[in-house]
Image (spheres, rainbow, N blue to C red):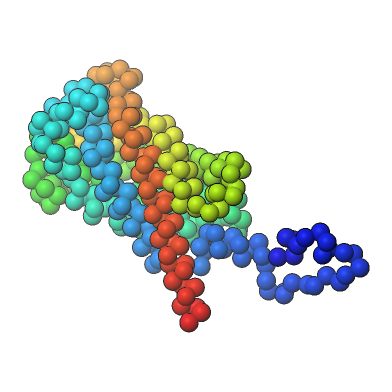
Amino acid sequence: MATDASPKFQKPDLLAVPHQPDYQPAIAAAAAVEHDGLHFWQFMVAGSTAGMVEHMSMFPVDTIKTRMQALGSCPIKSASVNQAVRSILKSDGPKGFYRGIGAMALGAGPAHAVYFSVYEFCKKRFSGGNPDNHAAHAASGVCATVVSDGVLTPMDMVKQRLQLGDSPYKGVWDCVKRVLREEGFGAFYASYRTTVLMNAPFTAVHFATYEAAKRGMMEVSPESTSEETLVVHATAGAAAGALAAALTTPLDVVKTQLQCQGVCGCDRFVSSSIRDVVRTIVEKDGYRGLMRGWMPRMLFHAPAAAICWSTYEAAKSFFQESNDGNNLA
């Protein structure tokens, strides 16, 4: 590129060679980095793959978090991670860490396909072609969250009920049928409002931290980050996931309570009011109850975000190379 030329070739008496009218290096570079040339279905496949890998690999940690957050569920009576692990092993054995994984498999793939495709669509619309518009990235993430939560929430509720100790359900479909028969369709979305209210700030913090971490690593070691893209995505994703998880734990506790109400001794609420649930938690366990499960939640989201972002970027790179190869053929 002309901007990279050595000073000895930049003499005033030489005529500058103009660029081709249609060639814009900045836009071309941004497109290459952000993979904006992918088809819509390719974003969906990349997102679905990332979501499945993320949730399946970290599912045991999610089970520990759910048990700790369900205040009245048996046999967990303490917020200790060690006690939660021992109790799960005692009541269900090693397989207890994976109860409900089928529900998450059914929900995570479609939800993440929707999430990343909506995110990429909104990012392109909101950013105006500016790859450094982080406010647009955060707004795009919030839009993606609202839509994807509508897909994931029902299966997330089923998953959490199956994760409880002494769960009365035999499996995914038994839980779905019994909830429909005994509680109605609305039970699947009892926590939707809380989920959105939790994931909106989670997403905003996540993307802001993710972009800041990437910029920080680029400034510290630009030569290595340009060569190890996946390492950068994984490290920035882990930092973003841990911080966002810690800050939104209280709302996650409320979500768990709403999804597991009436099962295994958990309280049943007259409405899905966040205020009522918070009041009940504080009365039973004090304000510390709102932070139940914060440690496994951070232990889940830090590596989960690293896995998700690196998998997603790798899948996008694969499709980009495939598309480039087809265009050259």
Q: Nearer the viewer, residue 55 or 158?
A: 55
The quadrant in which residue 269 appears is top left
Residue at image coords 13%, 33% = 89
Q: Quadrant of the N terminus?
A: bottom right
Above or below: residue 145 compared with residue 251: below
Residue at image coords 32%, 48% = 54
Above or below: residue 31 compared with residue 272: below
The answer, for residue 16, to whether it is visible in the render is yes
Instruction: Give the image location of residue 267, x and y in percent.
Output: 19, 28
Q: Nearer the viewer, residue 201 or 24?
A: 24
Instruction: Give the image location of residue 207, x and y in percent.
Output: 49, 44
The quadrant in which residue 249 appears is top left
Instruction: Report whether 173 appears left or right of 314.
Output: left
Q: Nearer the viewer, residue 198 or 223?
A: 223
* Name of the residue lying farthest toward the right: 13
* Name of the residue lying farthest toward the bottom: 329
Instruction: Give the image location of residue 113, x and y in percent.
Output: 36, 58
Residue at image coords 83%, 70% = 16
The quadrant in which residue 87 appears is top left
Residue at image coords 58%, 44% = 221
Instruction: Report whether 116 appears left or right of 158.
Output: right
Instruction: Give the image location of residue 316, x and y in percent.
Output: 44, 61
The answer, for residue 135, to whether it is visible in the render is no
Above or below: residue 120 compared with residue 64: below
Count of marks placed on residues: 0
